[in-house]
Image: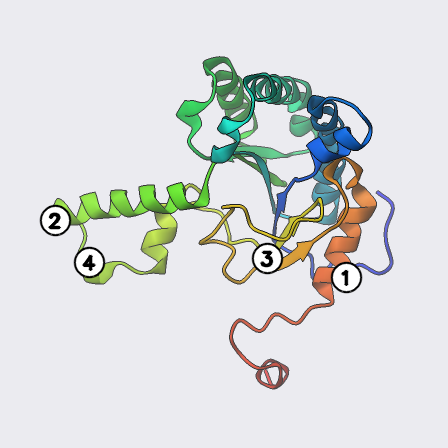
Amino acid sequence: MTRHAEIDLTRIPCHVAIVMDGNGRWAEQRHQPRLFGHRAGVESVQDVVAAASELGVQVLTLYAFSSENWKRPVAEVGGLMSLLKTFLVKELDKMLNNNVRLTCMGDLPRLPSEVRSTLEQSMAATAGNSGLTLNLALSYGGRAEIIQGVQRIARQCLAGQLSPEAIDEEVIDAHLYSAGLPDPDLLIRTGGEARLSNFLLWQASYAEILFSPIMWPDFRRRAFVDAIVDFQGRERRFGKTGAQLRAG
């Protein structure tokens, strides 16, 4: 990997989450069908995954398909599912060779059976890898995640397995799709829009957020490095004052 002098390799964010936005608009600007943009976006995924792995990012969560995306035209949804399956098949050897562990979160039963089967096979094959965790958010919605987590907690309370007074952040964390993963340190949204779009609503409470004007198909290694540099230039206070942090 080309080293970038401006990056402090001792202060790499542990978990980076990305809303990969702008594929459709990128294609429309080129008078191409929306799937043309999604295909180009796969190359950005490959580039950013490689960069994250080489820089030492521990978890990379990609918002690949939201629960709201099921409302898109049938042809586009079908094309996205086909692209996902093809990506999983083609990238498996690369993930194995580069020690990448694949995980997934979301309402997975809604995925087509053949896609879900391929996804499960890829996750099982890479489960023993100890490098970058590539976490795909598929059929994912932050509100649904929280609702389902609360429902599971409520059932435990009704069964007498948990006291309401014992419910704290750790209990809620343990009942979310993302259980076992650290909260994101940096959340990037590409494509020029400035909203979270129902992504990691609980987990992103203290994430540094970067809204990039770059459309996802053009968001490659250099843009990812620039985002890390921007992150390293910020002071993360977590409710404290800057003076308190500097005083130790």
Query: Quick one: label 4 or label 3, which is nearer the N terminus?
Result: 4
Which quadrant would the C terminus be assigned to in this image? bottom right
Front tag of 2 and 1 = 2
Residue located 61% across and 86% down the image: 243
Alpha carbons under labels 3 and 2: distance apart: 36 Å
Callout 4 secondary element: helix
Callout 2 secondary element: loop
Which mark is drawn over residue 160?
2
Residue for badge 3: 185
Residue for badge 1: 8
Amino acid marked by disc 1: Asp
User: Is residue 20 visible in the rendered structure shown here?
Assistant: yes
Coloring basis for residues: rainbow
Query: Quick one: label 3 or label 1, which is nearer the N terminus?
Result: 1
Query: Quick one: label 2 or label 1, which is nearer the N terminus?
Result: 1
- Residue that sits furthest to the top in the current view: 114
Alpha carbons under labels 4 and 2: distance apart: 10 Å
Residue 150 percent location from the top left of the image: 29, 48
Tell me where residue 40 sits by quadrant. Answer: top right
Alpha carbons under labels 3 and 1: distance apart: 15 Å
* Up-down relation of residue 52 to residue 36 (above or below): below
Alpha carbons under labels 1 and 4: distance apart: 44 Å
Residue 139 percent location from the top left of the image: 48, 31
Residue located 75% across and 61% down the image: 230
Residue for badge 4: 164
Residue located 51% across and 54% down the image: 183
User: Is residue 139 visible in the rendered structure shown here?
Assistant: no
Front tag of 3 and 1 = 3
